[in-house]
Amino acid sequence: MHKSRLAGFIIDCQTTDLDGAAQFWASALGYTLKPPPTAPHEAGYRHFETGAAGLHIEVQKVEHPSRVHLDIETDDIEAEVKRLEKLGAKRVQQLHKWWVMEAPSGQRFCVVRPQRTDFAANAHRWD
Amino acid sequence: MHKSRLAGFIIDCQTTDLDGAAQFWASALGYTLKPPPTAPHEAGYRHFETGAAGLHIEVQKVEHPSRVHLDIETDDIEAEVKRLEKLGAKRVQQLHKWWVMEAPSGQRFCVVRPQRTDFAANAHRWD
């Protein structure tokens, strides 16, 4: 058995001004921006403070056209990807540990490790 | 003064099989589908049961390419649209009472009336 649930969403921005884009979305949605991450591999991300059990929301700098994509968090990425494949989704690309997938209706989404602190208590259990 | 906050998101599906698309997303995210709406003007929508204070999530049949878009809920649509314009967003189209807007980073989103039952208690207040 494994668990999964909606982790939140990523606001993908095709922009040369990541901080400006992040500030717009933080102000629009009423969230506080966390300080920019310091790790080099996190340079393309900005995170929002959404509360302990709040959704995981990020703004990400991307090269493709801007969009919004959903993230599903899970304690077993391979098991979750297989569950989603049975529902009709397709694997697109593995990046680090996570998978980019495509829904039957065409949207891209990601399957990632647990992002929220209440994951174990509140995620759906798939037997 | 008025209030607003993230209401949730709409999964826009370019599909001839709305029920199939809705079932995929319900199963993927672990939500229960509500019965299909009976009002003719709601025929293109399917709603998820996400709990009293949960996000408002819908699957919508669309003619444009599939995507995900965010909804901002507010008790004063015109005041909220003006607030967002000052942040750099643009009005795209008014549909019924709500506004389709475009973020500076290019994503479309909607400004709608309150969708969630805890709106008055928990939305952000803009003075």
Image (cartoon, coloured by chain):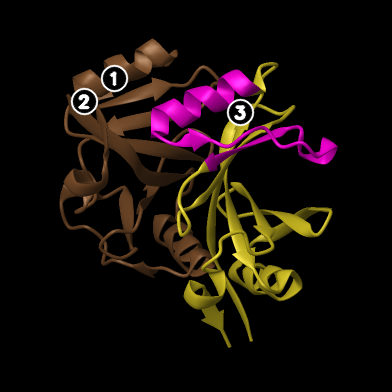
Chain colours: A brown, B yellow
**What is the quadrant of residue B29 in the picture?**
top left
Looking at the image, which is closer to me, A55 or A101? A55
- Residue A113 in picture, x, y percent from top left: 20, 36
Relative vertical location of residue A84 with respect to residue A112 in this rendering, above or below: above
Range shown magenta: B19-48
- Residue B99 in picture, x, y percent from top left: 75, 57
Instruction: Specify whether disc 3 shares its chain with disc 1.
Output: no
Which residue position holds label 2?
A: A77
Mark 2 vs mark 1, CA separation in Å: 6 Å
The residue mark sitting in front, 2 or 3, is: 2
**What is the quadrant of residue B39 in the picture?**
top right
Relative vertical location of residue B66 with respect to residue B93 in this rendering, above or below: above
Looking at the image, which is closer to me, A38 or B77? B77
Which residue position holds label 3?
A: B66
- Residue A88 in picture, x, y percent from top left: 44, 13
**What is the quadrant of residue A22 in the picture?**
bottom left
Which residue position holds label 1?
A: A81
**Residue type beneath disc 3:** Ser
- What number is the disc on residue B107? none
